[in-house]
Amino acid sequence: MRFRRDPRRGRYWLRDIHKYANFEIQEGQSDQVNKDNKIHIIWDLDHDIKASTRGEEASDESNPMAEGGENMTVALSTAETNASLSGLIPVYPQDAAVQYFSTTHKCWLIAWTHLTPHSDEPGVRSVCYNIHVALQSSERKNVPLDMLRHPLEVGEKVEVYIKSGGGGVWAPGVVDGQTKKAKMAPDYKVKLLDKTLARVPAVQVRRHFSPGDSVEIYRGSVQGWVPATVQESLGKAQCPTPLSQNSPQPTEIHPWVMVPVVETMQCDNPVPEDVPLYLLRQSSGGGGVGEEPDLDKEGLLTV
């Protein structure tokens, strides 16, 4: 079962003091709130957080604590942004941990989402996905969905790219563990049908759905997620068209494929449609000693 996050309450991470602050948004619906048509944010702060955000513990101008008041301004802005997203259904929630595909480095990086509303046309709103990459201060704005993915979890079905001879194949497997890194996505331990690979680079691992799996398709920020069933794939798997020039380009090791699905609500003569893997998610949650895989000089698995 999945629960939708309430955009009117939550918590914000104050990075400089490494603490969370809880907030609740009110809009004049109570006698205790001034009816001035403004958004009011109620903060639940303990003494340590109040002192830090006022800079009381800072004795040196270079100390990041001295700029704590700036953190509160950012937090207020985030709370107001969450309120402005009310009614929209995003692929990733606010402040979600994601993996961001770096075209420059050809790898997945650890990142967090910062969502903002966007108006495509008068009266038509959508979600803009901005991200903060780990160990970087700059924000990447309006990141296309084919450059983001949820971190892979233990027990998830995946495909692993294994280099063989002059080419390579995608072999089905299951995530059985991970080795974390500071900035890059972790290497994954993957259990295949005949062996276990102890450490596979994240760029060589992608999600996999089998025929008959119950999934959900993302139909936009208004309709959200709808139930569907994965169908048998006919012919060679195709890669989706890149959404931007920075998106993953067609290569042997591509993070996305087109997946044939049928919406559950289609009753009469359902017609399968090919949907990009990044617009699918599992509808509900649900060996031997690993061996080091052989890597070539490019860091690719070989058999």
Image (cartoon, rainbow, N blue to C red):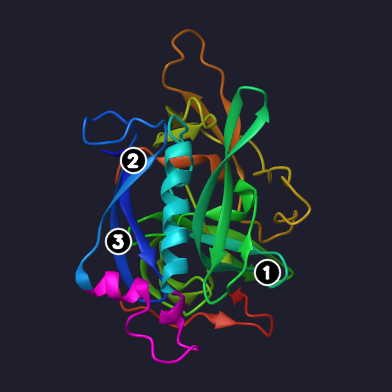
Rendered-image quadrant of the N terminus: top left
> What residue is disc 2 on?
8
First to last magenta residue range? 48-67
Which amino acid type is marked by label 1? Lys
Residue 48 position, x and y percent, is: 24, 75
Residues 288 and 136: in front is: 136
The amino acid beneath tag 3 is Ala
Q: Which residue is mark 1?
A: 106
Kindly check if marks 1 and 2 are in contact, taking CB atoms under 8 A apart as contact.
Answer: no
Q: Position of residue 207 (x, y in %)?
A: 49, 53
Q: Secondary structure at mark 1?
A: loop
Q: Say which amino acid is labelled 2.
A: Arg
In which quarter of the view is residue 45 placed?
bottom left
Question: Can residue 216 be seen by looking at this rendering?
Answer: yes
Is residue 243 found left or right of 277 in the rendered image?
right
Question: Alpha carbon of mark 2 to alpha carbon of mark 3: how far?
Answer: 14 Å
Q: Is residue 286 visible?
A: no
Residue lying at the far bottom of the rendered structure: 60
In the image, residue 262 lies in the stretch drawn in magenta: no
Q: Is residue 190 above or below residue 291?
A: above
Query: Of marks 2 and 3, which one's residue comes earlier in the chain?
Result: 2
Residue position for label 3: 21
Asked if residue 158 is positioned above or below residue 59 in the image, the reply reads: above
Q: Quadrant of the C terminus?
A: bottom right
